[in-house]
Image (cartoon, rainbow, N blue to C red):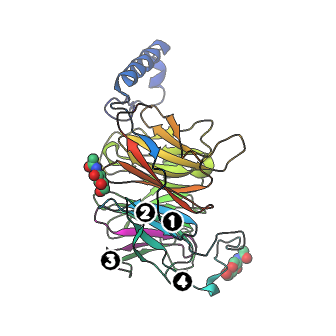
Amino acid sequence: MLVGFVVTCDCRPGQIGDLDDEFYLEVRDLLSKHAAHQAPVSAPRRPREVVGWPRPLPHLGQVTGVAVNSRGQPVVFHRGPRVWDASCFNASHDFQHVAEGPIAVSTVLTLDPESGAVVSDWGSNLFYMPHGITVDAEDNIWVTDVALHQVFKFRPGETRPALTLGQRFRPGGGWTRLCQPTAVAVATSGQVFVADGYCNHRVLTFSQRGRLLRLIPLPSEFLSLQVPHGLALMETLDLLCIADRENMRVVCPRAGLVPYASVQPVSIQAPDLGRVFGVAAAGGVVYAVNGPTSPQIPVRGFTLDPSSETAIDRWGPSAGFHNPHGIAICPNGTTMYVTEIGPNKVWKFSLVSGESV
Ligand SMILES: *[C@@H]1O[C@H](CO)[C@@H](O)[C@H](O)[C@H]1NC(C)=O
Ligand SMILES: *[C@@H]1O[C@H](CO)[C@@H](O)[C@H](O)[C@H]1NC(C)=O
C-alpha cells in the first residue's frame, strides 16, 4: 500500500532474523486483504474517443506536448516544419542545426475544447526543438526545448520567459546545466519538477523561484531512470510519477511535497507496457501512452493503478495510435488529450465516470 497502511521497520540488520516467516506471511495476507477492500475507491474513468475532433484540423508539425489550462482549453506544443532525426544531435548532444535558426511559425497553440479550432497562438522564432509543455495552477506555461537544453516559464500572455533553467545550446550535467530536458510538472505549492531527460536520466526539483532543491534519484534511493520522458504529480499521495521510457515502466518515487510523509515508492510494469512516452494523473490513477517498442507490443493507452501497481485498463482510439507522445487531463478530470508525432495529431477523449474498467 502507499499510505496509511505502511509496514515500516526501523530495525537494524540482524533483528529481522528474530522474526519468523509466519509473521511475514500474516503481514502479506493482511496487506492483500486491505488492498482488496480499498482499491479502487471509485471506478477509474475510462477514456472514450471524441470522434471527429478537432474540426477544422489545425496545421501541426510533430505535436510533442499538450497541457490544459484553467479554462479547460488544450494548449499544444509542436515543431512546425522541424523534425527530430539522426542529423539533429551529435554524440555529445549538441544541436547541429543552430544555423537554421529558431522555428519561424507559432509553436504554442491554444485550442477551443469544443471544436478544436485555434483560439490563440504564439512561440514563433523562440524554439529549436520543442518537447514538453505544462500549464501550472496559475496558468503559467512551462516548456522544454531539447535543442536549447533549457526549460522556460512564461507568464500568461507573455512571450519573454519569467524563468529559464539550463544554458542555451550547452548540454551538461551538474547543477546549472540540463541535457535534452523532456518534461515539467508543477505542484500547487509552486515546486517544479524537471525531467532531465535523454542524457542525464534524472529529475531535478526546484523551488518556485528556480532554486535547486533536490535530485531524483539520490544514490540511496536505488532507482535508476532510463530516459525520464514524462511527469505526472499525484499530490494527495505525494508521488511523482515518471514515464521511465527505456525501462518500460512508470515509477513514482516520493515527490517530497509533504514533509516527513511515509510514502512507499511505486513501480508499475506490465509485459505489454512497452516504452512509456507520456503520463497524466487523475482520480487516483495514472493514464499512460506507450510508443513503438516491438511488433508484439501494441501501441495504446493504459490506465495504471498505483495502489496495486498494475495496469487495470487498456484503451485507444478506434483507428489506433501510432506514435503517441504527449498526454494531459483537464483540471476537473472530465477530458483527456493525447498528441502524436507522425502522423501529427491531437486526440480528444472524454473520461467517462461510472463505467467500470
Ligand atoms: C469541466 O471543465 C470543462 C472545461 O472547463 C467544462 O466545460 C465542463 O463543464 C466541466 N465539467 C464539470 C463536470 O465540471
Ligand atoms: C558536437 O558538436 C559541437 C558543435 O556543434 C562540437 O563542439 C562538439 O565537439 C561535437 N562533439 C562531438 C563528439 O563530435
The answer to whether the residues at label 2 and label 1 have Cβ atoms under 8 Å apart is: yes
Of badges 1 and 3, the one in the foreground is: 1
Closer to the chain start, of discs 3 and 2, is: 2
The answer to whether the residues at label 1 and label 4 have Cβ atoms under 8 Å apart is: no
Which image quarter is the C terminus in?
top left
Q: Which mark is residue 260?
A: none
Q: Is residue 82 left or right of residue 337?
A: right
Amino acid type assigned to the residue bearing label 2 in the image? Gly
User: Mark 3 CB in 8 Å range of ligand 1?
Assistant: no
Q: Position of residue 194 (x, y in %)?
A: 45, 62
Residue where numbered disc 3 is placed: 157
Say which of 37 and 14 sits in front: 37
Location of residue 95 (image quadrant): bottom right
Residue where numbered disc 4 is placed: 104
For the magenta stretch, what is the residue range?
Answer: 137-158
Residue where numbered disc 2 is placed: 116
Q: Is residue 258 left or right of residue 199?
A: left
Tell me how far mark 3 sits from mark 2, CA to CA. 20 Å
Amino acid type assigned to the residue bearing label 1 in the image? Leu
Of badges 2 and 4, the one in the foreground is: 2
Tell me how far mark 1 sits from mark 3, CA to CA. 24 Å
Closer to the chain start, of discs 3 and 4, is: 4
The crowding category of the residue bearing disc 3, from other C-alpha atoms within 10 Å (few below 14, some 14 to 19, many at least 20), is few
Which image quarter is the N terminus in?
top left
Location of residue 273 (image quadrant): top right
Tell me how far mark 3 sits from mark 4, CA to CA. 19 Å
Closer to the chain start, of discs 1 and 4, is: 1
